[in-house]
Amino acid sequence: RDAVSKQCPASLIRDIAENGVDPAPLWTSYLEAGWTELTDPENAVELAIVLEELGRATDPTPFLATLSQFAPLVGDRFDPMSAGAAVFSGVSAIRDVDGWVLTGTDRFVLDGDRADRLAVVTPAGVFVVGADQVTTRRVDIFDPVLHVAEVSFPGIHVADSERLSADTERAHHVALMGMAITMVGACQRILDLVVEHAKSRQQFGVAIGTFQAVQHKATDMYVAIERARALAYFAALTIAADDPRRRLAAAMAKASAGECQSLVFKHGIQLFGAMGFTWENDLQFALKRAKAGELMLGGAADHRALIAEEYGRDI
């Protein structure tokens, strides 16, 4: 937390959003710290710790996509010195005499526009392609420092050697865990800002934090965050131990994080009042990161349905 606070302060996030400052030096600092080497499944908890703090800081680098989505798909092909992204849908692979031909488009690829390599999930397997082989276009979204891109494959020829027999199910669990703990970090940032505001903002001659209604909302936020955090770390533990419960644990973590952001978003805005809607308030960056996480890799309702279906089979 100390390292991230120094290297990725709120002022840097605002500079990137307002002035287009390049976050490359920040990414380089992560490389030098060795954080991009946390790719072994046994390091899932350590990866979660880093991702939570980066979520709290509204990290503007491709760390989340590289470590939680790309790396689990490529295994020992991973290069800790380069960025990667995962293409999960929209692409088909057809066999030809020279190998394979990849065709299709995925409209929402996290960091697809600035990755060095892409892991492409198809019904025929996972393929690794260079960024120079595809067409990318960054998509405008409400989070000003999050990169989401449309990635197109106009009949790309790929050799057999670039086809991997990856464990896509386990990779999906890592991706869900990573997104969930990132959302938890963003929600924690919202609560931190709310508590700071409630201690300093005065109405009727006293801090608004002394009002019971404010305390109740802050407490509800805290409980929701702790619940989501516990489930996210449990998911990380099941991944590290290769526990068969990891499928449900990952779904529970993402569902809980989604429900958490909904409550924290609502209460965070309300407790800040009109100030919470202004561009000048740093609250917006954490709110947008938490909401973006809910919209990627399936929302809370999707994962709750999966959990209900799973338990229904055992009844």
Image: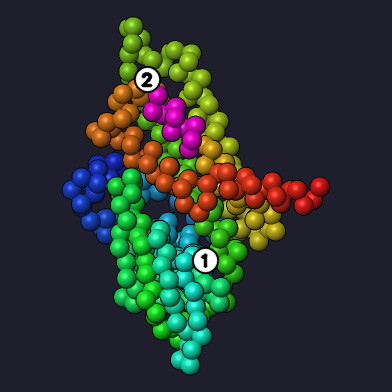
- Name the spot of residue 101 as percent of width and height, x first: 45, 82
Q: For the point 61% across and 59% down, which residue is it?
A: 240
- Name the spot of residue 97 as percent of width and height, x first: 48, 93
Per the image, the residue denoted by label 1 is 72
> In the current view of this chain or complex, which residue is farthest to the bottom?
97
On screen, residue 68 versus residue 197, left or right, reads: right
Residue 252 included in the magenta stretch of the image: no
* Mark 2, secondary structure of its residue: helix
- Name the spot of residue 295 as percent of width and height, x first: 46, 48
Determine the main secondary structure of the stretch shown in magenta: helix
Residue 284, image quadrant: top left
On screen, residue 32 versus residue 293, left or right, reads: left
* Mark 1, secondary structure of its residue: helix
Which of these two is toward me, 314 or 166? 314
Per the image, the residue denoted by label 2 is 199
Q: For the point 30% across and 35% down, which residue is it?
A: 282
In the displayed structure, would residue 120 be above or below residue 143? below
Q: Is residue 54 visible?
A: yes
Q: Is residue 1 visible?
A: no
Task: Report the span colored magenta.
Answer: 261-270
Which colour style is shown?
rainbow
Residue 153, image quadrant: bottom left
Q: For the point 47% across and 24% down, which residue is it?
A: 218
